Amino acid sequence: MGVPAHTPSWRDQFAAVMTSAIGIGIVAWIATQLIQPGTHNPLLIASIGATAVLVFAVPHGALSQPWAVFGGHTISALVGLTIAHTLGGGILSAALAVALAIGAMHLGKCIHPPGGATALSVILAAHDNTLLPWTFVLNPVWLNVVPIIILTYILNLPFPWRRYPANMHTHLAAQPLKTAQLEQEMSFTEKHLAAALDEIDAMIDISDDQLQQVYHALARQQEDTHITEEKLQLGAHYSNGLSGSEWAVRQIIDSSEASARKQQIIYKTIAGANKGEIRVMPRKLFAAWARYEVRTGTERWERV
């Protein structure tokens, strides 16, 4: 089992379709007004269509942010022009242009997939005996890229959940818990989440702001499912919800009802860490440890 793919809501899909149509339409109109007749430069670079998919469908993705869009296209165009003016058009030139564009975007911290298409388009033009001038960076690359960044910002303003760039995003969900409280409630911190991504060692299209939102959302989910003292039942099984060697299932085998302040839980660890251990713990601490109730299934423990 993996994490199921998330499908955006219909309203977000509708907003993406409408904003992209308006955005590309305006960019094309601007180009027709500024490009001089008889020039060899195209009206629109094809890669701007791929950029539109990213900025309008995934406005908060790391690959969709302004510097990624502007820097990615600019650097890739320069790489493509350098290769075309040096080696001309051809298979080797195409391979080098895309590969070096990727490397340059990594160095510039502006990875933007459509940038590879921008570099390749220069080589394809050279292959057709059209050596694009260095002004290609200004016209049409910047002439397409700058307006689409501005338009993405403007067109997403009516949609609070789609504000662009990502740091302008206003989340409509409940306000996140304070960091100190989170570290007490959660079994891991933001640093653990960031370290896990570093361990994966792969490019993941998620910004720092989104990563923090995921962390706070997990905290709210965990808080919502937290077991309260009143819900603890004699004979029931509870899990701490952790993974790996820290996971455990405990069964309440006895409890003291002497007073609200001195209530004690006697539990036995049925599975996981410290299996077979029998200990006494204050009811309040056991409730803080337990994340949810479980029961034995056909092959594994199942959440109730």
Image: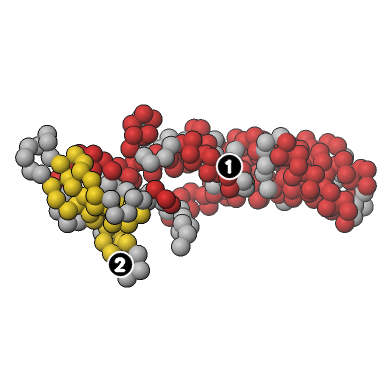
Question: Alpha-carbon neighbours of circle 2 within 10 Å: few (<14), some, or many (≥20)?
Answer: few
Q: Find disc 2 in the rendering and name its residue.
A: 297
Which residue is most to the front?
277
Q: Is residue 105 above or below residue 292?
A: above
Residue 144 in percent (x, y) is at 70, 41
Asked if residue 95 lies left or right of residue 285, the reply is: right
Across and down, in percent, residue 129 comes to 92, 52
Image spot of residue 62 (x, y percent): 58, 41
Q: Amino acid at mark 1?
A: Asp
The local secondary structure at tag 2 comes to loop
Q: Amino acid at mark 2?
A: Gly
**In this rendering, is residue 110 above or below 97?**
above
- Which quadrant would the C terminus be assigned to in this image? bottom left
Of the two numbered discs 2 and 1 on the same chain, state the one appearing first in sequence. 1
> What label sits on residue 198 in the rendered view?
1
Report the residue that reaches farthest toward the bottom.
Answer: 298
Question: What residue is rendered at 33% in x and 45% in y?
Answer: 222
